[in-house]
Amino acid sequence: IRPPRPDKLRDMPRTNASSPAAAGFVYLASQSPRRALLLEQIGVAHQPLLPDADEDAEALEVTRPGEFPQAYVERVVQAKLEAALQRLSRRGLEPAPVLCADTTVALGRRIYGKPADEAEARRMLAELSGRTHRVITGLGIAWGKSRRQRAFATQISRVRFAPWTAAEIARYVASGEPLGKAGAYAIQGRAAAWIEHIAGSHSGIMGLPLREAALLLERAGLSAAQVSGCRTEPSMHNT
């Protein structure tokens, strides 16, 4: 399998790393614990910017008829970023760059999001069994005065599964790991035992391609060399 060419970063005006944009941390607008851990891995301080109780975050991920997988991911990332910026404004929080991401699995033009239940998880895994699929992760960041400066990136990896038996799929689904995961699996979990080949970014398959994330953060005035540690959002905003 030929490794995919990384997409170019888009809409990326240069920012002076010593400018006020370098707040020392980034808001991570994601409920994924894996993305938080990946940011910690490269030493980037972050603060969660989670949805309010009355926000329907899942509605942003609904697919549109005939939508191509990459276009879908890029649209959802833009929608997530806009929702996060509105959230930041409502709460009157300290200014800082806002980072968000979205990941989906695709086989041809078919999009495999998070399974609604165990039956859908079993169906997804049966269709991915013994085949090569794409894992597409989009990133978006906003910074600067009123967070008007924005940049986006997309990373595409390819993953080939070994054949799964129906019994293996049933046991894996029964573990509960596939639920809440795009494509009904987690590469960092038990599914790794069935992965024969990867071309691309392991961290991207987990949900946050670190090379692309580092480049976006650099544009916003942050880098792993400048910040370290983790901040915790006040509990009143952890909704």
Image (tube, grey):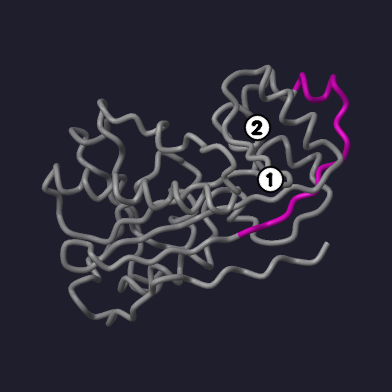
Residue type, numbered disc 1: Arg
- Residue 43 or residue 174, whichever sits in front: 174
Snapshot quadrant of residue 174: top right
Residue type, numbered disc 2: Ala
- Residue 18 or residue 108, whichever sits in front: 108
Residue 107 rendering spot, x and y as whole percentages: 73, 44
Residue depth check, mark 1 versus mark 2: number of the one nearer the observer = 1
Residue 215 rendering spot, x and y as whole percentages: 45, 72
| Magenta-drawn stretch contains 182 | no
What's the CA distance linking mark 1 and mark 2? 17 Å
In the image, residue 31 sits, relative to residue 75, either above or below, namely above
Residue at the farthest front position: 66
- The residue sitting at 44% across, 55% down in the picture is 40
- Segment tinted magenta in the rendering: 156-171
The quarter of the picture where the C terminus appears is top left
Q: Secondary structure beneath disc 2?
A: helix
Q: Decide: marks 1, 2 in contact (CB < 8 A)?
A: no
Residue at the farthest left position: 92
- The residue sitting at 46% across, 37% down in the picture is 61
- The residue sitting at 46% across, 40% down in the picture is 32
Residue 204 rendering spot, x and y as whole percentages: 59, 55
Q: Residues within 10 Å of mark 1 (few under 14, many from 20)?
A: few
Q: Which residue is mark 2?
A: 184
Residue 45 rendering spot, x and y as whole percentages: 34, 58
In the image, residue 202 sits, relative to residue 151, either above or below, namely above
Q: Which residue is mark 1?
A: 109
In the image, residue 13 sits, relative to residue 213, either above or below, namely below
The quarter of the picture where the N terminus appears is bottom right
In the image, residue 43 sits, relative to residue 112, either above or below, namely below
Q: Secondary structure beneath disc 1?
A: loop
232 on left or right of 165: left
